[in-house]
Every structure is written in structure tokens, then in C-alpha cells.
């Protein structure tokens, strides 16, 4: 096989994995967006004040219904802790929000088989229980309070989440209507669509990297290479080596969130054990970029403890899941039941039908997202200008002000990137580049559409600046209430 053939086969395998899971991604992110729009995070914060078993169960449940990417989960866990949540409960929340989620289970089922989807929830519950047992004995209360004091006292260099710490006990910006009323309204569903689109936008790089890397791992890496990494044929010791190696591969792969599932499929076909595969999937929270973030949040000493505890609990959960499934006769055959993933998936079959339905549903969600102003949605939300995630303003993990405008972020990671180069991210209609005289594109502050200031159908001046609009209708709405679109609510675009 030539180099070009290998590259082509790798991309084809990655595309096949994506096509096989497209409908599941739309379904999972759609459900996640609905839950995030209709469930109050303030209630979560008030419920996580200790690490008793009942509280840890609550933390796991809240995390599972607040599914998010690894970066956002880490930021939210830090914010919950700084606002009074117990440290162990906050970390349990973080574990659950990336590992006990529906979209992850669906993609695991499609790429690897139902046993892996079941193992996600069984092993995830074991992992959270182990974390609740071990972490309080490793991180003492005095150390926790020292870190909490530093987080609340010093804040973050960008303004940080602690600038809003006083809002932790209320749903400032949260729509007053009950979830039962909102779930029957287009405004509520447009907010849910906003979460869905923003979460997909936020995770687009992880997803692309995950499928591309998995395609190359599947097609370009000889099976002999994988088998040389994973010890087989030695019973317990082989399984132990695999579950310890799985998290290490996750650390150096840099692929987090749901993007690591395709790579897990390639590793499974390469010879890693069932438990090792599960441990690898769970280890999306200890990739190198996240370890650097933990160090900034909690300091070097506590980060080292977290790495040790997280790695141990992830490996132990993988080991326990392997032997539990073996005892129950549920352990899948080494082939995974799917052969070589990403192959022979195109054509007119049930996957194609589901993908077509999913694309229609996604188009409807995108329409709701683009028209949320018309339906009364978007109140109390902002859009992270770096990653595109929809953020509830009252509970944004990080915030800053640039050129008189407030910006809100899903995590300190995004806030630091913004502060390092604000002109790049602020040029969205609210920072440099928003005026009619600027070169390049601008964003209509009413509907969010990208327009060329030189050819825009309408313009309006306010506070010494000129804004460009997609049409007279948006210009008239802006003129009637400019502060409504240039205050914090304007950031929801």
C-alpha cells in the first residue's frame, strides 16, 4: 500500500466513523442542549455542600444532565467549588459531566457495541464512587480551604469567575418562567438550540481531531505496533497493564471529550483489553492541556494529587468493569462485534435514513438558534467569543471587560486566550472591527448575521460608533433599544 493510499484510507475510515455516528451526535447534543436550557445550575450548587453518599449521587446526576466538554466541565467544577460546593462533590460532578452522558454512550454503542455503552455507565458509577471514597482522604479540608480562599481572593487574571461569586445563590439572568412553561415555548427551545449549536461549535476541533486521528490509527498503524503496546495472554497481569496504559495514552493523545471515542475504537481493534478501552475513554479529564489548567486552578501540589487519584480511579474502574462483565458473561469478543470500524458504512441503509432525519432535525435546531431573538430566547445568556459555547451570564466561569463591553467565557482557558489577543476575538460586532468603517466583516448586533460594512443594507450610529445591519428591520430594532443589544445580553450572539 502506497503512502497516498494509506492517507486516503485513513481519511475514508475517519469519515466512515463520522457517518456512522452522525445521527447519534445530533441526538445526544440535542438532548444535552434541552437539559441545559431547562435545568437550573443554581440548584445544583446549593445541593453540593458535602460529600456524603447522597450528595455524591446528586453530583453525579447533575453532572450527567449537564454534559459538556472536558474544559467546560473542569471550569464549572472549579466554579462550583469556589462558590461553596464540596471539593469532592465538585470533582464527582466533573467526572459525571463528561463520562456519564447519553451522547457518549450512543457513540460507544455504534462504534464498539452495546457492551461498551453499558460499561460507560456501570464503570462511570464505579469511578465516581471510588473518587468519593479516595479523594477526601488525599485532599484534606485544610488544603481545600486554602485553595478556595486563593480562588475567591485572587480571582483570575481575566476577571475570572469569582467576579460573579456573589451570584452563586441566585439565578440572575435565568428566565423567571418555570421549566414546564418554557418547555412549551419557542423561546425555551430556541435557548436549547443555542446550547446544542454552541456545544457542537465548542467541540468541533476535538471531534475532527478524534475522527482523523482514529482514522490514521485504524488504517496507517500496523496491528503489530498496537499489539506490542498491550500485553496479552497473561491473565490478570495483562488486564492490569492495559488499564494502566489506557489513561497514559489518553494523556499524550490530547484528544478529549467525545472525540476520544473513535480513537478508543481503533485501540480496541489494535488489541487493548475491554477494561483498558474503558479506562482510556474515562481518561479524557487528564489530557496534558487539562493538567496545565488544573495547575493554574489548584496549584502544582494539588494537581499532582488529582492526577494520581484520577488515574488510579479510572484504571480501577476499567479493571472492575472488565471482571464484572466477565463474571456476567457480557465481555465482548476481541473483534468488538463491529469488525473494522468506519468500513462499508455508506449506502442506503438504516444509518443513512437516521442520518438524513438527524440532518433535518439539526436544520430545525439551527433555524431556532438563528431566530431566537424573534421567539424571545437568549435572555441571560452570552456566547463565549473564543470557543462559541453558550454561557449563562449569572454563572459564567470567567468574565472580562474589553473596550467597555463585557465578555463571558465557558472556562478560564478561553478567558486567557481572549486576554492574550482580544482583537482577534472581539472583532465580532462588539470590539475592534465592529464599525462601518472597519475592513472585513462585522456582525449584525441584533440577529448575529455576518455582514460587510461597506455594502450592508443599513447602518445606525450610537455612542460615537457606527453599526452595520443585514437589513432595515434589524436597524430599526437596534435604534429603538440600542442598550438592549450592546449590554451583556448582546454577547449572546
Image: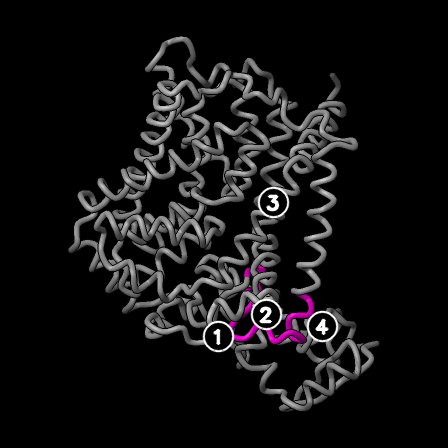
Q: Residue at x 39, y 23 (%)?
A: 325
Q: Could you tell whether 20 is left or right of 53 in the image? A: right
Quarter of the rendering occupied by the C terminus: bottom right
Question: Foreground residue, 471 or 151?
Answer: 471
In terms of sequence position, does the residue under pointer 3 or pointer 1 come before the other? 3
Evaluate whether residue 432 shows in this view.
no
Disc 1 to disc 4, how far (Cα)? 34 Å
The circle drawn on residue 67 is none
Determine the secondary structure under disc 1.
loop
User: Which residue position is annotated with label 3?
Assistant: 25
Q: Find out whether residue 382 is within the magenta segment.
A: yes
At label 1, counting other C-alpha atoms closer than 10 Å, the crowd grade (few under 14, some 14-19, many 20 or more) is few
In terms of sequence position, does the residue under pointer 2 or pointer 1 come before the other? 1
Q: Residue at x 49, y 59 (%)?
A: 36
User: Which residue position is annotated with label 2?
Assistant: 185
Where does the magenta region start and end? Answer: 369-389
Mark 3 and mark 4 in contact? Answer it, CB < 8 Å. Answer: no
Q: Residue at x 35, y 57 (%)?
A: 78
At label 2, counting other C-alpha atoms closer than 10 Å, the crowd grade (few under 14, some 14-19, many 20 or more) is some
Determine the secondary structure under disc 2.
loop
User: Which residue position is annotated with label 1?
Assistant: 177
Residue 197, position as x, y percentages in the image = 62, 57
Is 173 drawn above or below residue 24 in the view shown? below
Q: Quadrant of residue 450?
A: bottom right
Determine the secondary structure under disc 4.
strand
Question: Foreground residue, 408 or 89?
Answer: 89
Mark 3 and mark 1 in contact? Answer it, CB < 8 Å. Answer: no
Amino acid at each position: 500500500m502506497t503512502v497516498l493510499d494509506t492517507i486516503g484510507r485513513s481519511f475514508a475510515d475517519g469519515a466512515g466513523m463520522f457517518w456512522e455516528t452522525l445521527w447519534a451526535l445530533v441526538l445526544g447534543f440535542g438532548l444535552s442542549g434541552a437539559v441545559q436550557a431547562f435545568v437550573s445550575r443554581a440548584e445544583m450548587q446549593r445541593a453540593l455542600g458535602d460529600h456524603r453518599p447522597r450528595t455524591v449521587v446528586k453530583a453525579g446526576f447533575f453532572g450527567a444532565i449537564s454534559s459538556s466538554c472536558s474544559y467546560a466541565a473542569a471550569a464549572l467544577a472549579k466554579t462550583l467549588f469556589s462558590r461553596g460546593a464540596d471539593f469532592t462533590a465538585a470533582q464527582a460532578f466533573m467526572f459525571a459531566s463528561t463520562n456519564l452522558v447519553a451522547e457518549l454512550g450512543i457513540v460507544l454503542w455504534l462504534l464498539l457495541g452495546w457492551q461498551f455503552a453499558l460499561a460507560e455507565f456501570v464503570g462511570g458509577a464505579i469511578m465516581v464512587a471510588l473518587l468519593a471514597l479516595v479523594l477526601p482522604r488525599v485532599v484534606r479540608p485544610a488544603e481545600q480551604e486554602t485553595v478556595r480562599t486563593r480562588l475567591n481572593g485572587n480571582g483570575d487574571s481575566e476577571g475570572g469567575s469569582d467576579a460573579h461569586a456573589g451570584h452563586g445563590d441566585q439565578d440572575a439572568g435565568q428566565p423567571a418562567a418555570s421549566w414546564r412553561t418554557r418547555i412549551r415555548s419557542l423561546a425555551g427551545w430556541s435557548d436549547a438550540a443555542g446550547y446544542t449549536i454552541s456545544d457542537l461549535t465548542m467541540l468541533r476541533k476535538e471531534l475532527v481531531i478524534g475522527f482523523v486521528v482514529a482514522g490514521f490509527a485504524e488504517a496507517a498503524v500496523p496491528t503489530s505496533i498496537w499489539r506490542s503496546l498491550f500485553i496479552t495472554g497473561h491473565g490478570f497481569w495483562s488486564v492490569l497493564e492495559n488499564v494502566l496504559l489506557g489513561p497514559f495514552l489518553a494523556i499524550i493523545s490530547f484528544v478529549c471529550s467525545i472525540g476520544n471515542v473513535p480513537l478508543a475504537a481503533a485501540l480496541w481493534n489494535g488489541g487493548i483489553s475491554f477494561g483498558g478501552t474503558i479506562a482510556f475513554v474515562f481518561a479524557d479529564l487528564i489530557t496534558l492541556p487539562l493538567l496545565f489548567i488544573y495547575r493554574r486552578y489548584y496549584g502544582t501540589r494539588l494537581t499532582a494529587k488529582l492526577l494520581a487519584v484520577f488515574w488510579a480511579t479510572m484504571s480501577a474502574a476499567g479493571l472492575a468493569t472488565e471482571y464484572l462483565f466477565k463474571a456476567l458473561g457480557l465481555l465482548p469478543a476481541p473483534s468488538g462485534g463491529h469488525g473494522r470500524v468506519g468500513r462499508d458504512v455508506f449506502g442506503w441503509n438504516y444509518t443513512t435514513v437516521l442520518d438524513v432525519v438527524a440532518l433535518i432535525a439539526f436544520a430545525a435546531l439551527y433555524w431556532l438558534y438563528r431566530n431566537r431573538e424573534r421567539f424571545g430566547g437568549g435572555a441571560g445568556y452570552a456566547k463565549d467569543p473564543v470557543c462559541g459555547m453558550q454561557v449563562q451570564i449569572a454563572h459564567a466561569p470567567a468574565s472580562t471587560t474589553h473596550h467597555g463591553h463585557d465578555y463571558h467565557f465557558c472556562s478560564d482557558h478561553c478567558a486567557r486566550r481572549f486576554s492574550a489577543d482580544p482583537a482577534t476575538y472581539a472583532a465580532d460586532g462588539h470590539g475592534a472591527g465592529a464599525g462601518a468603517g472597519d475592513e472585513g466583516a462585522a456582525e449584525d448586533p441584533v440577529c448575529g448575521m455576518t455582514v460587510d460594512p461597506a455594502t450592508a443594507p443599513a447602518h445606525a450610529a450610537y455612542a460615537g460608533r457606527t453599526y452595520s445591519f443585514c437589513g432595515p428591520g434589524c436597524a430599526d430594532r437596534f435604534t429603538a433599544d440600542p442598550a438592549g443589544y450592546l449590554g451583556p445580553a448582546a454577547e449572546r450572539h
